[in-house]
Each structure stands twice: as structure tokens, then as C-alpha cells.
């Protein structure tokens, strides 16, 4: 059985920030629709803003399920797994919101990241008000070695102008796979 924590304390903060990858899970309201789980990574794209608040940079990608689901109902879970060292899984359950690159508050949200990688292709900042912090054993999570960050996401979008990214959002990120509006 896992343990519940009242907040993201120093030990949990250290564990979370040491993980090179985390997973984001969201789902639309109701019994229909697809549950989405997305891996996230890149150093500098995740910050802990307080004992009950975190945020991450959301880059343009093949889908935009998280933003659509957050607009629909706000529910979100972030999961961090230890792939080296002692086994552990930490989950942050909460209510999320997004601030798109086109919104006035975007620059303020972006300022919360002290050392982001190239931000040219960031489409939104996702902020989570954490309501539940828990861990579990992680005994079945394999041990793996981290080799390096991938730079393909950044380099692939570096060839696109700001106008190209507007078109990308309008054509490839306009709706979720279930037809929910994104932007």
C-alpha cells in the first residue's frame, strides 16, 4: 500500500526533480472518450512552484489531448517513476489549467521556469493545483540507464516560423481525438 503525503515536501521534491521523464494522464468527462497518457521530458520543462502547485511546458506535438481534457474537466495526474536507485512511484493528482502562447498571461507563466530549453515551440504552460500526493512501491518498474536528452522535438520545430506554428495549432491541434476543442 502506498503512502499519502500532505504536500510535496523536500524529499519528494528532490525525487520528482531528479526524474528525467514523467507521465501525464487526463480523460474527457463521462463514460465515452479516450484516456490519454503522455510521456514528458527535457530538463528545465518542469517546475515545482509550491507544496501544492507544479507546472510544465507543453510543446507543439502530434496531439493536444491534455489541453482539451483540462478545458473539459480539469482532472490530471502526473506520475514519476524511479528507473534507477531504490524503486518508487510518485503520483500528483489535481486540477490543471493551461495558458496558451496566444494568451496575455503566457509570459508570466513562462517566467516560472528558471532554465527552460528553447521555448520557440512551447504552445502552452500547464499548471496543476495538486490535491493529492501519493507514492507506491515501484517494484515492477525496470532499472534503466539514462543516456541523454533527445533534441528532436526542439530541432523539428526550430524550422517552423511563429506563423507556421499558428497554422500547426489550427490544423493539427484544433481538436482532441474525441473532437473536443483545444484552442
Image (tube, helix red, strand yellow):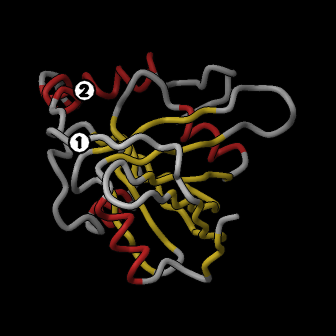
Dividing the picture into quadrants, the one containing residue 49 is: bottom left
Q: Is residue 159 left or right of residue 25?
A: left
Figure quadrant of residue 80: bottom left
In this rendering, the answer to whether 22 lies above or below 64 is below
Residue 145's disc is: 1
User: How many discs mark residues in the rendered view?
Assistant: 2
Residue at 43% over, 37% down: 39
- Classify 140 as above or below 113: above
Front residue of this view, candidates 167 and 118? 118
Q: Position of residue 117 (x, y in %)?
A: 16, 49
Whether pointer 2 and pointer 1 mark residues with C-beta atoms closer than 8 Å, the reply is: no
Judged left or right of residue 148, residue 8 is right
**149 and 73: which one is in front?**
149
Q: Nearer the viewer, residue 52 or 170?
A: 52
Q: Position of residue 32 (x, y in %)?
A: 83, 26
Numbered circle sitting on residue 75: none
Question: Residue 163 shows which numbered tag?
Answer: 2
Name the residue at 33% across, 58% down.
46
Query: Where 145 sits versus 32, above or below?
Result: below
SS at badge 1: loop
Label 2 neighbour load within 10 Å: few <14, some 14-19, many 20+ = few
Q: Give the SS element for disc 2.
A: helix
Q: Quadrant of the N terminus?
A: bottom right
Q: Is residue 52 left or right of residue 1?
A: left
What residue is shown at x 60% (from left), y 53% (from top)? 77
The residue under the point 68% across, 52% down is 75
Residue 59: quarter of image? top left
Disc on the earlier residue, 2 or 1: 1
Whole-percent x, y for residue 115 in the image: 16, 62
Q: Is residue 26 above or below residue 105?
A: above
Foreground label between 2 and 1: 1
Amino acid at each position: 500500500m502506498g503512502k499519502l503525503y500532505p504536500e510535496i515536501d523536500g524529499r519528494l521534491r528532490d525525487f520528482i526533480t531528479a526524474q528525467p521523464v514523467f507521465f501525464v494522464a487526463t480523460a474527457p468527462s463521462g463514460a465515452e472518450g479516450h484516456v490519454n497518457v503522455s510521456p514528458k521530458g527535457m530538463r528545465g520543462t518542469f517546475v515545482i512552484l509550491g507544496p501544492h502547485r507544479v507546472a510544465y511546458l507543453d510543446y507543439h506535438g502530434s496531439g493536444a489531448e491534455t489541453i482539451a481534457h483540462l478545458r473539459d474537466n480539469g482532472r490530471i495526474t502526473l506520475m514519476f517513476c524511479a528507473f534507477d536507485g531504490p524503486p518508487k512511484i510518485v503520483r500528483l493528482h489535481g486540477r490543471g489549467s493551461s495558458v496558451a502562447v496566444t494568451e496575455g498571461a503566457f509570459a508570466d507563466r513562462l517566467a516560472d521556469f528558471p532554465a527552460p530549453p528553447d521555448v520557440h515551440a512551447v504552445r502552452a504552460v500547464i499548471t496543476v493545483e495538486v490535491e493529492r500526493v501519493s507514492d507506491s512501491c515501484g517494484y515492477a518498474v525496470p532499472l534503466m540507464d539514462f543516456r541523454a536528452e533527445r533534441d528532436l522535438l526542439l530541432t523539428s520545430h526550430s524550422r517552423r516560423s511563429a506563423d507556421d506554428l499558428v497554422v500547426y495549432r489550427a490544423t493539427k491541434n484544433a481538436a482532441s481525438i474525441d473532437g473536443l476543442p483545444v484552442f
